[in-house]
Amino acid sequence: MDLDHDTRVQALVARPVVYVHPNDTLRQLTATFVEESIGAALVRGPHGTIGLVTERDIVRAIADGASTSRTTVEQVMSEDLITVGPNEDLLTAAHLMLEAEVRHLPIMENGVAAGMVSARDALRALVELRDEATA
């Protein structure tokens, strides 16, 4: 498969990043996920992005007995973000997702979120690139 190594992750961003508040409950978080049709959101604190929360985090918390009305985003989010820059190539981002076993990568530029790339976004782009190459 001969992929275009010039494909940058920023080109995959189709929507603005969705932020949630660290004090939102899991119930509020799941409502946001459904409303926005997303599987991950960045968590915004008083001085910028402080974490990432995903569907997996919600499932783990509920499996551990968390209350959806009392457990907060801050209690289940990941603080150590694995990120990519906007000019990172698609294959590098895909490899990073596989190595880190994550499905969402915030795209950060100068400490500010420029977007989010999901495994689905990467897969879609890879399939499109392959289709273009074989057409």
Image (spheres, rainbow, N blue to C red):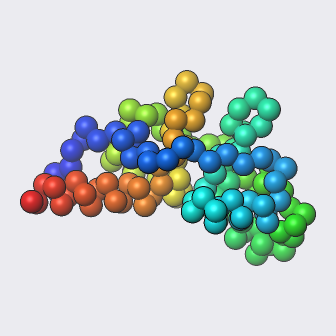
Residue drawn where x is 87% and y is 67% of the image: 69
Q: Quadrant of the C terminus?
A: bottom left
Number of marks in the image?
A: 0
Which residue lies most toward the right here? 70
Horizontally, is 31 left or right of 70 in the view?
Answer: left
Which residue lies most toward the top here? 110
Q: Quadrant of the N terminus?
A: bottom left
**Residue 102 visible in image:** yes
Horizontally, is 51 left or right of 25 in the view?
Answer: left
Residue drawn where x is 80% and y is 47% of the image: 22
Q: Position of residue 64 (x, y in %)?
A: 80, 72
Residue drawn where x is 68% and y is 37% of the image: 49
Residue 79: image quadrant is top right
Residue drawn where x is 81% and y is 54% of the image: 24
Is residue 49 positioned above or below 57 on the image?
Answer: above
Q: Nearer the viewer, residue 86 or 28?
A: 28
Which residue lies most toward the front here? 35
